[in-house]
Amino acid sequence: MKKLDRRFYQRDTLVVAQELLGKYMVYNHNGVDLVVKITDVEAYTGIHDKACHTYGGKRTPRTEVMWGEAGYAYIYLIYGMYACLNVVTEEAGNPCAVLIRGAVPVKNREQMCLNRYQKSYDTLTNYQKKNFSNGPGKLCLALGLTKEQNGMDFLSDQFYFYDSGEEKGYAIHKAKRINIDYAEEAADYLWRFYINK
């Protein structure tokens, strides 16, 4: 197991996004290591990307972490209730990030299920199992992530990504990013990347 270092995140956002696929993410929630494998991401490339929160150089208290050093968590709410986890990328002052859209449980799935559904995994319907963590809000619910974790360092022992060193053996698919119809030409960029777990 090799924890990803700062340099991994300091590179081009489109490269980081694709290389996060198949990596493992660990979040220690209330003393329990919750581990997932990343399967779905979207890249947001800063001030020139009309779909990005920092488009045009916008800088607000919410987006401040994006303007800082790479390798930190940017967590915001959608619809005022669902947390979305992003990984800050590139050099400080160039506010880019990768949205973690989906992942599959690897370790302590039962705890994730209690976080997500307040019941055990064995009692879930097939629909609930299929939709366990296949969206950014669903994933954050399963992991117990909230805005409280905004700004956390992915080099910490509580929250980090690692490479298992296993053979990849999968194709990376590209698609348009989701729910960004307002972004004009940027809505057509194929900057969503995913793998079939």
Image (cartoon, grey):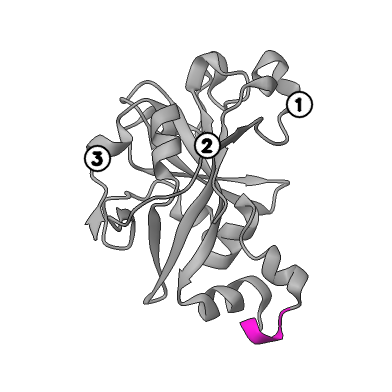
Query: Amino acid type of disc 3?
Result: Arg
Determine crowd level at label 1: few under 14, some 14-19, many 20+ residues with C-alpha closer than 10 A: few
Instruction: Tell us which disc is closer to us: 2 or 3.
Output: 3
> Residue placed at 75% from the left, 73% from the top?
126
Q: In this orientation, which residue lies closer to the viewer: 150 or 187?
A: 187
Mark 3 lies on a secondary structure that is: helix
Mark 1 lies on a secondary structure that is: helix
Question: Horizontally, is 82 left or right of 53 in the view?
Answer: right
The quadrant the C terminus occupies is bottom right
Q: Main secondary structure of the magenta part?
A: helix
Query: Amino acid type of disc 1?
Result: Asp
Q: In this orientation, which residue lies closer to the viewer: 57 or 191?
A: 191
The quadrant the N terminus occupies is bottom left
Relative to residue 173, is residue 84 depicted above or below? Answer: below
User: Pointer 1 and pointer 2: residues touching (CB < 8 Å)?
Assistant: no
Q: Which mark is residue 13?
A: none
Quarter of the view holding residue 191? top right
Q: Is residue 77 magenta?
A: no
Q: Which mark is residue 181?
A: 1
Relative to residue 62, is residue 12 depicted above or below? Answer: above
Per the image, the residue denoted by label 3 is: 6
In three-dimensional space, the C-alpha distance between marks 3 and 1, rounded to whole angstroms, equals 33 Å
Which one is earlier in the sequence, the residue at label 2 or at label 3? 3
Q: Is residue 121 magenta?
A: yes
In three-dimensional space, the C-alpha distance between marks 2 and 3, rounded to whole angstroms, equals 22 Å
Q: Position of residue 29 (x, y in %)?
A: 43, 70
Q: Which residues are magenta?
A: 120-124
Per the image, the residue denoted by label 2 is: 62
